[in-house]
Amino acid sequence: MAEIAAYIALGSNLSDPLAQIEQAWSELDGLPETRLTACSSLYLSKPVGYADQPDFINAVAGVATQLSPRALLAALLAIEARHGRNRTFKNAPRSLDLDLLLFDGLIMHEHGLTLPHPRMTERAFVLVPLAEIAADALIPGHDRVGDCLARCLAQTDRHDLIRLPPAPARAARRH
């Protein structure tokens, strides 16, 4: 079976968010039939929806996988669970959030899994790191990532995304 390109958004604002993201990258690379192909920079962002919580650390990872979309999603949910993810209410603070954004250009609307990820084209904290590693990737039903990012940034005057400086270990991980 051929490898499929997929992109995963990572976010955390509890329990040492930087360490949560770093560990999640390692766990993504350790998934069966999956290898990590790219890691974006880390970004600090303000929370969306529920504002009374700490800022988030966000990033995006690229993977090559032979897993199905459902199997990859199940693996992402298992990683979240190992990190203590607790879904108390919508937009709640979280130790780790892993969202499957894109899966080889697939469009899918099933219970618990929508591809491409809904609202991703409205969120700079997803599009900025995604554009860093895959600006030319197509978001089915929309446009290329770079073009979606340009529209997203043009539609808001709120640019509160801060790129964090790379630590030596992180710089070595980026592909």
Image: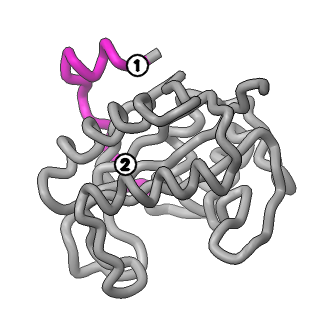
**Is residue 34 in the magenta section?**
no
What residue type is disc 2 on?
A: Asn
Q: Residues within 10 Å of mark 2 (few under 14, many from 20)?
A: many
Q: Are dots 2 and 1 in contact, CB under 8 Å? A: no
Residue that numbered label 1 is attached to: 174
Mark 2 or mark 1, earlier in chain: 2
What residue type is disc 1 on?
A: Arg
The answer to whether residue 82 of the structure is visible from this angle is yes
Say if 66 sits above or below 73 in the image. Answer: above
Color style of the picture: one colour
Residue 58 — which label? 2
Using the image as rendered, state which of residue 24 and residue 17 is in the foreground: 24
State the image coordinates of residue 60 (x, y, percent, origin top left).
48, 40
The answer to whether residue 154 of the structure is visible from this angle is no
Residue that lies at the very extreme toward the right in this rendered image: 141
State the image coordinates of residue 92 (x, y, percent, origin top left).
32, 78
Residue that lies at the very extreme toward the left in this rendered image: 16
Say if 162 sits above or below 114 in the image. Answer: above
State the image coordinates of residue 148 (x, y, percent, origin top left).
71, 48
Residue that lies at the very extreme toward the bottom in this rendered image: 89
Label 2 and label 1: CA atoms lie apart by 15 Å
The N terminus, quarter of image: top right
Q: Is residue 56 left or right of residue 19?
A: right
Q: Which residues are magenta?
A: 159-174
Which residue: 22% across, 18% down? 169
Q: Secondary structure at mark 1?
A: loop
Using the image as rendered, state which of residue 30 and residue 15 is in the foreground: 30
Q: Is residue 96 left or right of residue 48?
A: left
